Image (spheres, grey):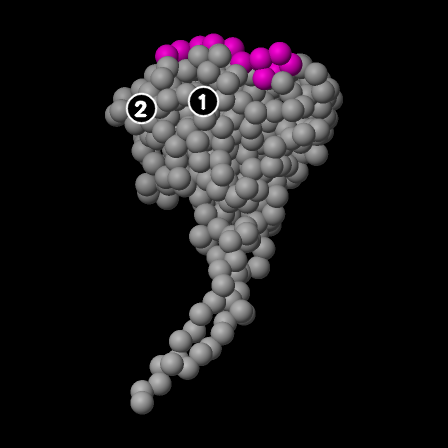
Amino acid sequence: MKKILVCTFVLCLQCTVSSFGQTWSTLPADLLVDMKTSSPGTALTASIMTAGTVSVNCTPGTICTWAAPTTNAFSVGSGLPACGNLGPVQMNGTGGTLYPAQALNFNSIAYNDSVPGPGSNEIMTFSGSAASATAVSALVCLTIGPPAQPLSGSDYDRLIFFNTAGNYAVLQFNNQNGCTPPAGYIGARIEVKPTAHSSCIYVLPQQTYWFSLYWNINTGVTYLYAFTSGGTQISCGAVSSTCLSNGAATVIAGNKGGGGLHQMYFGNNENGFYTGGTTTYFHNIMVNWTSTPNLMFWTGGAAVQPPTNLKATVQ
């Protein structure tokens, strides 16, 4: 009689595991833009932004307020599977929701790159506890629309924090003016006031990345980190005064002294635009002004081990 060895195992359905073979820590957030309440293609409004924003510590529409978009460049975009949250997200505050890994796969915000800046933005104004914050952290999953434009020195200001004194920290993209990317790439960097820039982190246009921006409003110290959609960090390159050994790009603002968190902009607050019909997508914007992790990203765990609950039977 021929004997066949058959292995069976029980699958663990409650393990927090990404498709990349890692477990991920829980990320705290005070504010989340999930856009699950509107259909793709709908023109963006202040009320749609309010409905698509989750917070306990900063009630959307009353404590933290979205304005109407300053141009018609914005609409509700489709969900981006690459931007699903790698690990759980815990909303800060009493009764804050805990979102399991990959639960945040709702809609995005689409930006028409052919609408020129500067001043093409969606803006939130903070009050309450956020208005007295001394630091802020943000995480955004961004699909970069415009291709590399090697003859252009124009900036794209994509995400900005302002304090009440008018100082700011910006996540921006650039092809020149201090960025010298390899062919086909663009540079992601920080700008602060008075105008100063960090080193550049080189990324590919029309691809999806996570960007973590930290700004200490009191000291002016600002950090930028970049990750692939799967959580692999992209270093800013050679270690220098504006490129740290941990891969972060950094710069110190000249204007310091606090002033509290005042506004968040996203869109295009600079002079870059592209007439080729591309779209930039903003997905899962998360902000933290209470515990302000630096960097604001999930901590990766050990690789998933093979199952140990195997049972061998002979048939």
Name the residue at 48% across, 57% down.
21
Q: Identify the element where label 2 is drawn.
A: loop
Inspect the magenta stretch and tell me whether residue 69 lies in it.
Answer: yes
Whether residue 217 sits left or right of residue 231 in the image: it is: right
Name the residue at 58% across, 55% down.
301
Quadrant location of residue 279? top left
Q: Is residue 174 above or below residue 37?
A: below
Q: Is residue 99 above or below residue 154?
A: below
Q: Is residue 218 above or below residue 305?
A: above
Residue 181 in view, yes or no = no
Whether residue 181 sits left or right of residue 139 in the image: it is: left
Marks 1, 2: nearer the viewer? 1
**Three-letter amino acid code of the residue under disc 2:** Tyr
Closer to the camera in the image, 203 or 293:
293
Closer to the camera in the image, 155 or 54:
54
Inspect the magenta stretch and tell me whether residue 222 lies in it.
Answer: no
Q: Earlier in the sequence, mark 1 or mark 2?
A: 1
> Mostly what secondary structure, the magenta segment?
loop
Residue 32 percent coordinates (x, y): 55, 28
Say which residue label 1 marks: 37
Q: Quadrant of the C terminus?
A: bottom left
Q: Marks 1/2: CA distance?
A: 29 Å
Residue 188 percent coordinates (x, y): 47, 35
Residue 54 percent coordinates (x, y): 57, 25
**Three-letter amino acid code of the residue under disc 1:** Thr
Say which residue label 2 marks: 274
Whether residue 7 sits left or right of residue 96 in the image: it is: left
In the image, which residues are magenta?
A: 60-72
Q: Quadrant of the N terminus?
A: bottom left
User: What is the residue that sits farthest to the bottom in this orientation?
Assistant: 1
